[in-house]
Each structure stands twice: as C-alpha cells, then as structure tokens.
Amino acid sequence: MKRVLVLQGKHLLTAGILNLLNRELDLKVFDTTISNEIILLDEIKKIKPEVLVMDESLHLTDRILFLNLLKECPGLRVIIINERKNLMHVYEKQEIKVGRGADLIAAIRKDEYLPF
C-alpha cells in the first residue's frame, strides 16, 4: 500500500484531494498542517510516505531545505499542484550511474534507454 502525505493548504483544494485519494484502496492517505520545513521533515520521517502532495500556494520559506528533503528521503516523490494553471509539478530524486560522457547528454535529453 502506497503511503501519501497531503499538506494542508487551501481548504477546498485539500478537501478535494483528500476525498479523491481516500477512494483509492491501494493508498494510505495522511494529512498534516505544517508551519515550516523542519516540521515537515519531522512529519515525513514519522509517516514515511512515498508521495508528498501539496498546493503551490503553500509558501515554504527555505527552498534549499525543502529540496534537501529529496536527499534525506530517497524515493520520495513530491507533487506540487498549481490549481490556477491546472498543472502538477513532480519532483523526485533520481540517481543514474555515469559510465561515459554520453550518459550526461542522455540524462539532459531524458533519452528512452535510461530508467527514468
């Protein structure tokens, strides 16, 4: 069962996301309200989600610390939703062994033969 943590943001968007996700039998959904990145990291360590979902309107003050979540939590996929533009931004840590210069070019181009 995939563990999903939803950060509380705009009430209606969060309520809709929670309602949608809780219908899925293969998802265990958690939600939380955070005030800073340190508390968020503590919640992630406690809940151990594979996916973090949040509204883009949540303004985290320390983006470097937030991006370090990807280092601290291997396998964590972060989905940031922009409801005004109907977009999802998906971030996840990826490690690719580099054996030759062409591997860098392939990663930039996201060539099909690499396991992304």
Image: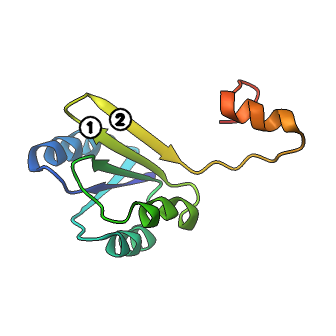
Q: Please, what secondary structure does the residue beneath circle 2 have?
A: strand
Indicate left or right for 111 with 30 as reference.
right
Q: Please, what secondary structure does the residue beneath circle 1 have?
A: strand
Sequence order check, earlier mark of 1 and 2:
1
**In the foreground, 27 or 34:** 34
Residue 18's tag is: none
Q: Give the residue displayed 35% in from the left and 35% down from the top.
A: 88
**In the foreground, 64 or 112:** 64
Q: Tell me which amino acid carries mark 2.
A: Met
Q: Residue furthest right?
A: 100
Residue 30, x across and y down, in percent: 30, 59
The answer to whether residue 80 is above or below residue 113 is below
Residue 60, x across and y down, in percent: 30, 61
Q: Residues within 10 Å of mark 1 (few under 14, many from 20)?
A: some
* Distance from Cα at disc 1 to Cα at disc 2: 6 Å
Is mark 1 in CB contact (under 8 Å) with mark 2?
Answer: yes
Q: Residue furthest left?
A: 12
Indicate left or right for 81 with 95 as reference.
left
Q: Give the residue displayed 70% in from the left and 50% down from the top.
A: 95
To which residue does mark 1 refer? Answer: 82
Residue 1, x across and y down, in percent: 46, 51
Residue 61, x across and y down, in percent: 30, 64
Residue 88's tag is: 2
Q: Tell me which amino acid carries mark 1.
A: Asn
Q: Residue furthest top?
A: 112
Q: Residues within 10 Å of mark 2 (few under 14, many from 20)?
A: some
**In the foreground, 4 or 97:** 97
The answer to whether residue 50 is above or below residue 113 is below
